[in-house]
Image (tube, rainbow, N blue to C red):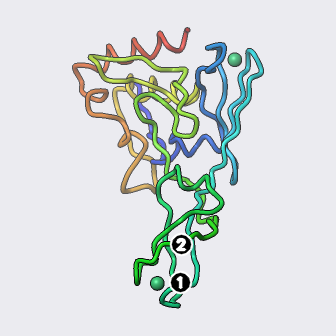
Amino acid sequence: MSRIVDEPYFTYSAYSALISGIQVKCPKCHGAGIVTADRDNARFRCLSCGHQETCDRTVYRYDVHNQCKDCGRYYRVDIEEEAGQHFSVLRVSCPYCGAAMSGEVHRTAQAFSYMAEIKDGKEPWFGLELWFLSSFQGKPVWALNREHLAYLIAYLSADLREKPPGYPKKNQADHLPTFMKTAKNRERIVKLLKKMQEG
Ligand SMILES: [Zn+2]
Ligand SMILES: [Zn+2]
């Protein structure tokens, strides 16, 4: 009889890339690469060809603020479309009187993007496909890295699953979609995960 004590909820999230790295496919050579992140940037580094990418994790707000030449009021217009954010000067309309005039586009650092989820088997910062990715009945089955893969195998093949002490609300397994936890699928999912582990 095998038993496992589950991990806390945020142990394996895209956010955990800050610490352990997410293993992904290199867009250039399709070899294995790693995505890591620190406070300011997310980084991709290919372990086979050396290809690298960096992406700024800061979220910026773009706006034109000005004093209206017509009505004299101060206004701020947020530039939400990405296309407009590349210009240094944009023509906008005063929200009070509608007079159109050119104004300088200001960029303000607003926050770091921590909100990051794995979508369609891709990591959130560069959109690179996960290295450990397979599918079961049309649904993606994936792991962020080797440790996460080992956790999934251990968790799903245990006969007895316990919540970690001190984390009463949610634990790591709450991330798992139901189809993975269903008793009738579990054995086949574990087989699939073990195959990924060998590859
Ligand atoms: Zn590469
Ligand atoms: Zn005006």
The residue positioned 39% from the left and 12% from the top of the image is 191
The three-letter code of the residue at mark 1 reads Cys
Q: Which of 113/16 is in front? A: 113
Q: Is residue 54 left or right of residue 164?
A: right
Q: Say if disc 1 is inside 8 Å of ligand 2.
A: yes
Indicate whether 189 appears above or below 94: above
The residue positioned 44% from the left and 33% from the top of the image is 4
x and y percent of residue 158 in the render? 38, 26
Q: Which of 9/7 is in front? A: 9
Residue at numbered disc 2: 101
Q: Is residue 8 left or right of residue 106?
A: left
x and y percent of residue 129 in the render? 52, 24
The three-letter code of the residue at mark 2 reads Met
Residue at numbered disc 1: 68
Indicate whether 103 appears above or below 48: below
Outermost residue, right side: 50
Indicate whether 16 appears above or below 184: below
- Quarter placement of the C terminus: top right
Outermost residue, left side: 184
The kind of secondary structure element at disc 1 is loop
Whichever of labels 1 and 2 marks the residue nearer the N terminus, that label is 1
**Circle 2 crowding by C-alpha within 10 Å: few under 14, some 14–19, many from 20:** some
Outermost residue, bottom side: 72
x and y percent of residue 193 in the render? 44, 17
The residue positioned 41% from the left and 47% from the top of the image is 171
Q: Residue 37: which quarter of the image?
A: top right
The kind of secondary structure element at disc 2 is strand
Q: Which of 113/110 is in front? A: 110
Q: Are marks 1 and 2 in contact (CB under 8 Å)?
A: yes
